Image (cartoon, rainbow, N blue to C red):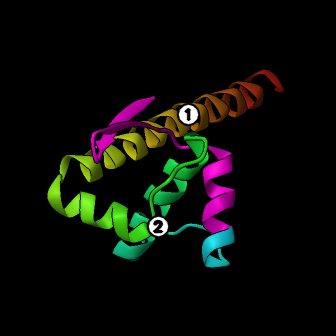
Amino acid sequence: MKKVTINNAEYTLRYTLRALFIYEEITGKPYSGDKMVNSYVLLCAMLMANNKDFPLTFDDVIDACDSDPSIFETFLAVLEEENKRISVIIGKDDKKKAMGKRTKK
């Protein structure tokens, strides 16, 4: 779990299922990182999902990111951590499948 500071307030930034639900509610489609705006909407969704009564608008978050690029850098670090976690899980599943094939002979 990482923290970002926006307008002198600290907020939790986590990649969660709730954040993905909020993203889909906002955009009407699942997250894809093919456009820059999608990443910023996901950033806002993550802030909304993990901070009760999050008071800022999308424009407020964009303004904060313009003033402090470390906010978006922290967001990217959260995504990278999630990608690594998923890679480990997928790797374990692949190893289990390979072990199952070897023992079934």
| Residue 32 percent coordinates (x, y) | 51, 69
- Foreground residue among 18 and 94: 18
Q: Residue at x 56, y 66 (%)?
A: 31
Quarter holding residue 64: bottom left
Does 86 lie within the magenta span? no
Dot 2 lies on which element? helix
The amino acid beneath tag 2 is Val
Disc 1 marks a residue whose amino acid type is: Gly
Question: Quarter of the image containing the N terminus?
Answer: top left
Q: Is residue 47 above or below residue 4?
A: below
Q: Residue at x 28, y 53 (%)?
A: 72
- Extreme right residue here? 104
In the image: residue 17, left or right of residue 74: right
Quarter of the image where one finds residue 58? bottom left
- Residue 80 lies, in percent from the top left, at 38, 43
Picture disc at residue 91:
1
Q: What x and y, as percent, mark residue 28? A: 67, 78
Distance between the alpha carbons at the discs numbered 1 and 2: 30 Å
Classed neighbour count for the residue bearing mark 1: other residues with Cα under 10 Å, few (<14), some (14–19), many (≥20): few
| Residue nearer the viewer, 62 or 31 | 62
From what the image shows, is residue 17 above or below residue 98?
below
Task: Report which residue position mark 2 lands on.
Answer: 41
